[in-house]
């Protein structure tokens, strides 16, 4: 039987629609497979942003702590009077506050960098999402255009022209799949638009936050300038007491020289005692090999008493030294504060231009804050020294650390310490150096810059 032209065209149209349904369904599967990396990307973005926000919270806590310390020093400065001793105290407190203020500005700038990192991340994600959204819109338009161009029959007509029930069921199945796909793509586009809107809100929030931090940095810099001007006025007032101040400078130099002399003397005495102890141990080993029992007992008894109660072996000292030497730039700070009010090395007096050498660093602390040893070692001396208060000396092989201006001491001479063990408490307002500690690092008889050894 020969088909009529009309029947032939109808069959061709049906076959075209079925072919279209299969192609659209295949396109749907491919598009859905491509979506999964985007979902993972969105998850990675959120995790990365959360990590940045956590860093911001930590930095903000540090800023608040520094602000609290600055307020304390402001109160102390405001309480000072016009007498020389009070003026000098005001000058010293301003110096500590300026160090804190500098640290706060650095922390604020660090927070600003973190916020800018967050802004860059959000902007990158917005660009990515905009591209994805545009791609989804283009895909959806292409599907709708293709459907329009290649199939004019509606769903009812397509089902009605089926040649069998089986063909009708298959057509119904693929038509449902096609509608599901269209609906999924529409939902995807709406979701991406909503996600994009959320990121825009995040961006606006971060930009506002960045603006606030920049304003805070500017305000802190103005405060810092004001405090430095106040310090300059204090310096001018101090110049009137030149004789007293010059005596003070001489006293500081004398204190430093006294520390150096005492330290070298303590090291020499420690080395002498260790030599005596090593010699005793050598002679004790020799005595134990004497054949004559009576003489052996006499010699063993003669060399059995240690040179001192506690002794650290050479092997242990080598282990201390090795551990210390590889920890440069990684040692923990002896207190929670990292604010240095007086640095290591040659310092120039701002009033007279005189130069003095500082053998360590002064770290601003809270009154009575716990002070901890920075590495394994043992206490080889405890000594009160003018200008440095009560001082604990700790030996780490050929390296030494010094903890001065302690208001309390927890350890005794020869106490063996593990890294992080408490040695005492920092100074208070009544201490020689006020609310701070003196910290020094030394190798044999050479002073080292402590900030190069402590973690950044």
Image: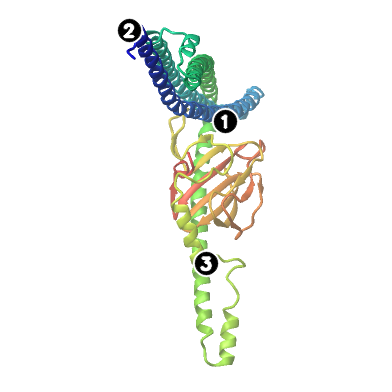
- On screen, residue 242 above or below 451: above
Q: Give the labeled residue for mark 1.
A: 58
The residue carrying pointer 1 sits among few (fewer than 14), some (14 to 19) or many (20 or more) residues within 10 Å by Cα, namely few
The first of marks 1 and 2 along the sequence is: 2
Are discs 3 and 2 less than 8 Å apart at CB? no
Q: Tell me the residue that label 3 is attached to.
A: 313
Dot 2 falls on a residue whose secondary structure is helix
Residue at image coords 32%, 13%: 2
In this rendering, the label closer to the viewer, 1 or 3: 1
Give the alpha-carbon distance from disc 3 to disc 2, as whole Å. Answer: 109 Å
Element at label 3:
loop
User: Is 161 in front, or is 231?
Assistant: 161
Pick whichever of labels 1 and 3 is earlier in the sequence: 1
Residue 5's tag is 2
Residue 267 rendering spot, x and y as whole percentages: 50, 58
Instruction: Tell me if mark 2 has few (under 14), some (14-19) or many (20+) residues whose alpha carbon lies within 10 angstroms of its own.
Output: few
Residue 276 visible here: yes
Q: Which disc is residue 133 wearing?
A: none
Q: Give how far across and how far down residue 138 sits, in percent.
A: 39, 13
| SS assignment at label 1 | helix
The image shows residue 413 at horizontal and vertical percentages of 61, 58
Quick one: 410 or 389, which is closer to the camera?
A: 410
Q: Nearer the viewer, residue 199 or 85?
A: 199
Answer with the quarter of the image where residue 295 lies: bottom right
What is the basis of the colouring in this image? rainbow
Report the side of 34 relative to 435 (left or right): left
**Gap between marks 1 and 3 measured at Cα:** 43 Å
The quadrant in which the N terminus is found is top left
Which label lies toward us, 3 or 2?
A: 2
Left or right of 86? Residue 172 is: left
């Amino acid at each position: 039987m020969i088909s009529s032209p009309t029947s032939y065209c109808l069959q061709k149209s049906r076959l075209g629609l079925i072919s279209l349904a299969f192609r659209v369904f295949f396109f749907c599967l491919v598009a859905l497979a491509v979506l999964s990396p985007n979902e993972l990307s969105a998850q990675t973005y959120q995790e990365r942003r959360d990590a940045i926000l956590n860093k911001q919270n930590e930095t903000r806590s540090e800023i608040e702590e520094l602000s609290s310390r600055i307020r304390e020093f402001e109160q102390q400065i405001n309480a000072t009077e016009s007498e020389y001793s009070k003026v000098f105290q005001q000058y010293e407190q301003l110096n500590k506050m300026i160090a804190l203020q500098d640290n706060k500005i650095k922390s604020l700038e660090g927070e600003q960098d973190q916020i800018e990192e967050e802004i860059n991340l959000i902007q990158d994600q917005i660009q990515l999402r905009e591209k994805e959204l545009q791609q989804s819109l283009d895909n959806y338009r292409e599907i709708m255009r293709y459907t329009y161009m290649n199939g004019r029959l509606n769903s009812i007509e397509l089902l009605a022209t089926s040649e069998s029930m089986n063909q009708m069921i298959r057509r119904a199945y693929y038509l449902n799949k096609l509608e599901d796909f269209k609906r999924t793509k529409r939902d995807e586009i709406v979701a991406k638009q909503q996600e994009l809107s959320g990121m825009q809100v995040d961006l606006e929030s971060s930009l506002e936050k960045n603006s606030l931090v920049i304003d805070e940095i500017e305000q802190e810099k103005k405060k810092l300038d004001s405090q430095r001007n106040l310090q300059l006025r204090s310096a001018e007032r101090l110049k009137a007491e030149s004789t007293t101040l010059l005596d003070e400078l001489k006293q500081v130099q004398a204190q430093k020289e006294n520390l150096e002399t005492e330290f070298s003397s303590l090291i020499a005495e420690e080395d002498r005692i260790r030599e005596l102890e090593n010699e005793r141990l050598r002679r004790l080993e020799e005595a134990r090999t004497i054949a004559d029992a009576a003489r052996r007992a006499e010699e063993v008894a003669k060399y059995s008493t240690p040179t001192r109660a506690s002794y650290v072996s050479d092997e242990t000292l080598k282990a201390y030294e090795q551990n210390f030497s590889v920890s440069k730039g990684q040692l923990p700070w002896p207190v929670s504060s990292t604010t240095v009010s007086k640095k290591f090395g040659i310092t120039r007096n701002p009033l007279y231009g005189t130069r003095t050498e500082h053998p360590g660093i002064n770290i601003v602390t809270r009154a009575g804050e716990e002070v901890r040893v920075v590495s394994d070692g043992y206490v080889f001396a405890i000594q009160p020294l003018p200008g440095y208060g009560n001082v604990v000396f700790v030996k780490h092989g050929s390296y030494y650390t010094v903890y001065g201006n302690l208001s309390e001491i927890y350890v005794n001479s020869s106490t063996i310490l593990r890294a992080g063990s408490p040695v005492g408490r920092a100074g208070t307002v009544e201490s020689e150096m006020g609310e701070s500690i003196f910290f020094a690092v030394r190798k044999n008889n050479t002073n080292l810059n402590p900030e190069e050894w402590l973690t950044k």
